[in-house]
Image: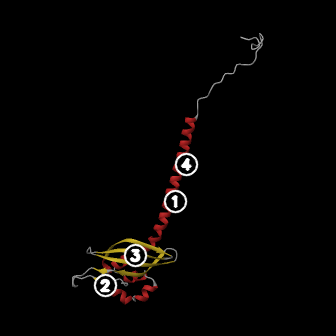
């Protein structure tokens, strides 16, 4: 070896540098981020689910008032409380159907025999709404129906119209259903 390259005897040029490489933390970092990211995703999912349920409940609660009003209306009629059912109607309904006419309609259309209601159509717009479906009578026959409502106050809905598309034939009829469509 060349003397110029060699340090003089007894002289220390420097401490030998020993490098020791730490094991990579990439696997730990990936797992840590994975758990953190997973936690964030789970929290976001829970938040979205709760928000979605609240939004759904908000819109579902809008028609709850109408559904409650029609349930009370037909329960009152079924129990023979015609005045109470009539009280669940709006002034526009009362103007169109005075109490004596309403009583005749209830008897003739057998509305006091409604045992169940099923509504598949719901519409709500600016404090007015409608439900469409069918009324099932105690004898199992059914009547297609559309009911219109108006919202009064915070949670109260009143019936503004009741349209029966046809009435099942009774034993006294000639067997033909009676068409309607213009109110009861």
Q: Are the residues tagged 1 and 2 within 8 Å (C-beta)?
A: no
Of callouts 3 and 2, the N-terminal one: 3
Q: Nearer the viewer, mark 4 or mark 3?
A: 4
Q: Quadrant of the N terminus?
A: top right
User: Label 1, on which residue?
Assistant: 51
What element does badge 3 sit on? Answer: helix
Residue that label 3 marks: 70
Question: Nearer the N terminus, badge 1 or badge 4?
Answer: 4
Q: Residue at x 47, y 68 (%)?
A: 61
Distance between the alpha carbons at the discs numbered 3 and 1:
29 Å
Q: CA distance from mark 3 to mark 2?
A: 18 Å
The residue labelled by disc 4 is: 40
Quarter of the figure with the C terminus: bottom left
Judged by depth in the image, the label closer to the viewer, 1 or 2, is 1
Q: Earlier in the sequence, mark 4 or mark 3?
A: 4
Residue 181 % position (x, y): 35, 83
Which quarter of the figure has residue 66?
Answer: bottom left
Query: Is label 2 in a helix, a strand or a loop?
Result: helix
Mark 1 to mark 4: distance in Å? 16 Å
Alpha carbons under labels 2 and 4: distance apart: 62 Å
**Image quadrant in which you'd find residue 98:** bottom left
Relative vertical location of residue 144 with respect to residue 2 in this rendering, above or below: below
Tell which of 164 and 74 is nearer to you.
164
Label at residue 107: 2
Between disc 3 and disc 1, the foreground one is 1
Residue at 45% from the left image edge and 86% from the top image edge: 92
Distance of label 4 from label 3 (alpha carbons):
45 Å
Q: Earlier in the sequence, mark 3 or mark 1?
A: 1
């Amino acid at each position: 070896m060349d003397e110029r390259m060699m340090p003089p005897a007894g002289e220390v040029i420097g401490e030998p540098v020993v490098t020791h490489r730490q094991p990579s933390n990439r696997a730990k970092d990936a797992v840590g981020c994975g758990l953190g990211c997973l936690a964030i995703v789970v929290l976001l999912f829970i938040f979205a689910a709760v928000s979605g349920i609240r939004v759904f409940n908000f819109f579902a609660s809008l028609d709850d008032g109408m559904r409650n009003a029609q349930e009370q209306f037909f329960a009152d009629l079924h129990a023979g409380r015609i005045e109470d059912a009539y009280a669940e109607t709006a002034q526009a309904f009362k103007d169109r159907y005075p109490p004596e006419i309403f009583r005749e309609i209830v008897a003739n259309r057998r509305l006091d025999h409604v045992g169940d209601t099923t509504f598949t159509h719901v519409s709500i717009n600016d404090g007015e709404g409608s439900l469409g479906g069918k009324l099932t009578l105690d004898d199992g026959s059914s009547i297609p129906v559309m009911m219109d409502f108006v919202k009064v106050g915070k949670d109260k809905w009143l019936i503004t119209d009741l349209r029966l598309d046809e009435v099942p034939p009774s034993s006294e009829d000639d067997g033909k259903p009676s068409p309607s469509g213009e109110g009861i």
